[in-house]
Image (cartoon, rainbow, N blue to C red):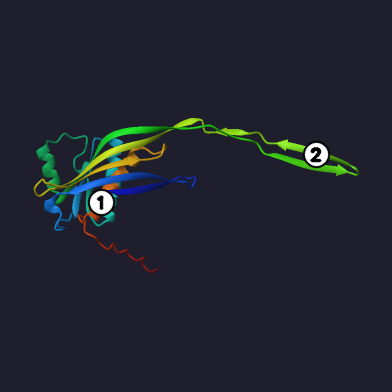
Amino acid sequence: MRIISYCLVSVLLLTACVMSDTTSFVDPDYSDGGYQITKTVVKIDGATLKEVLSAETALVEKFSSLGVDAIKYTDLIPPTRDYSEKEAAKIIKDTGADSLFITMVGEKSEIESFVPPTYHAGTTTSYISGYGNFATVNTYTSPGYTTGGYTTSEPIMATKSLLIDLSNGNTVWQADGTSSGESFHSYVDLLISSGKSAITDLHTKGLIQTVDLIETPDPKI
């Protein structure tokens, strides 16, 4: 089981994280380390169009960072077209991909938390002024204020991810994931976090070959 946090930095320089918990299983026929993917198609199921497009882009970038050639499913099978399963399978096979990575969105929910009100008293400041034998004390108290007294809703999303061997249609690996965030996070944030956590798990399980990414040096001027 892996717990990974992906952080977003706001314009106020405050850091808040989406937490993702992934539990996975590798099929015994693929657990000997002899199977590693090099090219995959990334598909999102059970999500809104916005979630699909955003998550596919982010997960393709994640695979690419690990040296895997990845293709968005919607680039092959646009949502505006009605292909049969046989036609879709042929289109995917013709890409030369060795696998299909699927993340399916499950239950979405929110946890509500009440932030109790807290009163903050004002600050009192005294000033002393005098002339001769006379002194005057002036006191100023800033107004108090109250914080809290409101309810927040933190989103939670459950996902299931699969890795399919396109040479025979077998399920190589599967994972259950749960992601949670702060009240300002969207379900898109949670889906991307869960998908990235799943891909990291694939790498940890040895299903993605470890590569040393070589940075191209800047050209000399």
Disc number placed over residue 137 in the picture, else none: 2
Q: Residue at x 37, y 44 (%)?
A: 18
Q: Amino acid at mark 2?
A: Val
Q: Residue at x 36, y 33 (%)?
A: 110
Neighbor class of circle 1 (other Cα within 10 Å; few <14, some 14-19, many 20+) is many
Residue in front for this viewpoint, 110 or 104: 110
Q: Disc 2 on helix, strand or loop?
A: strand
Direction from residue 220 to residue 118 in the image, left or right: right
Residue 26: percent from the left, percent from the top? 17, 50
Disc number placed over residue 12 in the picture, else none: none
Kindly check if marks 1 and 2 are in contact, taking CB atoms under 8 A apart as contact. no
Residue 104: percent from the left, percent from the top? 23, 39
Direction from residue 156 to residue 14 in the image, left or right: right
Q: Which residue is mark 1?
A: 201
Neighbor class of circle 2 (other Cα within 10 Å; few <14, some 14-19, many 20+) is few
User: Quarter of the image holding residue 169?
Assistant: top left
Direction from residue 148 to residue 16 in the image, left or right: left
Residue in front for this viewpoint, 107 or 51: 107
Q: Amino acid at mark 1?
A: Asp
User: Quarter of the image holding residue 42?
Assistant: top left
Q: Residue at x 19, y 40 (%)?
A: 77
Quarter of the image with the C terminus is bottom left
**Gap between marks 1 and 2, in whole Å?**
69 Å
Q: Let me know if residue 47 appears in the view.
A: no
Q: Disc 1 on helix, strand or loop?
A: helix
Residue 156: percent from the left, percent from the top? 34, 37
Residue in front for this viewpoint, 51 or 17: 17
Q: Let me know if residue 77 appears in the view.
A: yes
Residue 98: percent from the left, percent from the top? 14, 51
In the displayed orientation, state which residue is furthest to the bottom.
Answer: 220
